[in-house]
C-alpha cells in the first residue's frame, strides 16, 4: 500500500500539514492537518509499504505508547485515508 497521490508534508507554525503536489494536486484539493504521528504515517506511505511496517515504525518512534493503541490509531487513520481516496492498496 502507498499514497494514491504524491504529498508534501511540512510543518507550518508548529502544525504538520500535507498537500498534494505536482499533477496530483488536481486529484486532491485541500490540506490535511496532522499530528506528529499522522505526519510520520504520510511520510512512510510515500513509498510502497505494509501496515505492519508502518506500525513497527510508529512503535519505535513512540516507545512509551501502548502497542495496541498505536495499532487502533493506525487502522483508523488508514481507513480515513482510504475513504478520502488517498490510499492505494
Image: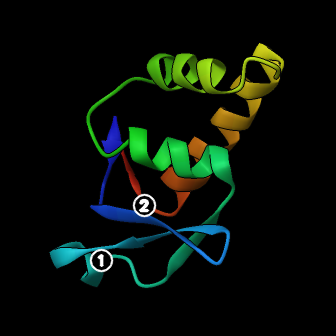
Image-quadrant location for residue 47: top left
Estimate how packed mark 2 is, as few (under 14), some (14 to 19) or many (20 or more) residues with alpha carbons within 10 Å.
some
The Cα atoms of the two marked residues, 1 and 2, are separated by: 9 Å
Per the image, the residue denoted by label 1 is 27
Image-quadrant location for residue 85: bottom left
Quadrant the N terminus occupies? top left
Per the image, the residue denoted by label 2 is 85
Q: Secondary structure at mark 1?
A: loop
Q: Are marks 1 and 2 in contact (CB under 8 Å)?
A: yes
Most foreground residue, 31 or 13 = 13
The disc placed on residue 58 is none
Residue at x 61%, y 53% (from the top left corner) = 80
Residue at x 45%, y 18% (from the top left corner) = 53
Query: In the shown orientation, is residue 68 left or right of residue 57?
Result: right
Picture coordinates of residue 62 (x, y %)? 71, 26
Quadrant the C terminus occupies? top left
Image-quadrant location for residue 2: top left
Estimate how packed mark 1 is, as few (under 14), some (14 to 19) or many (20 or more) residues with alpha carbons within 10 Å.
some
Picture coordinates of residue 87 (x, y %)? 40, 49
Amino acid at each position: 500500500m502507498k499514497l494514491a497521490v504524491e504529498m508534501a508534508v511540512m510543518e507550518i507554525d508548529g502544525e504538520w500539514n500535507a498537500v498534494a503536489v505536482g499533477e496530483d494536486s488536481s486529484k486532491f484539493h485541500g490540506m490535511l492537518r496532522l499530528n506528529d504521528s499522522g505526519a510520520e504515517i504520510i511520510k512512510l506511505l510515500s513509498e510502497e509499504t505494509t501496515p505492519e511496517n508502518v506500525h513497527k515504525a510508529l512503535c519505535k518512534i513512540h516507545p512509551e505508547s501502548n502497542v495496541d493503541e498505536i495499532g487502533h490509531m493506525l487502522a483508523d487513520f488508514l481507513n480515513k485515508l482510504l475513504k478520502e481516496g488517498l490510499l492505494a492498496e
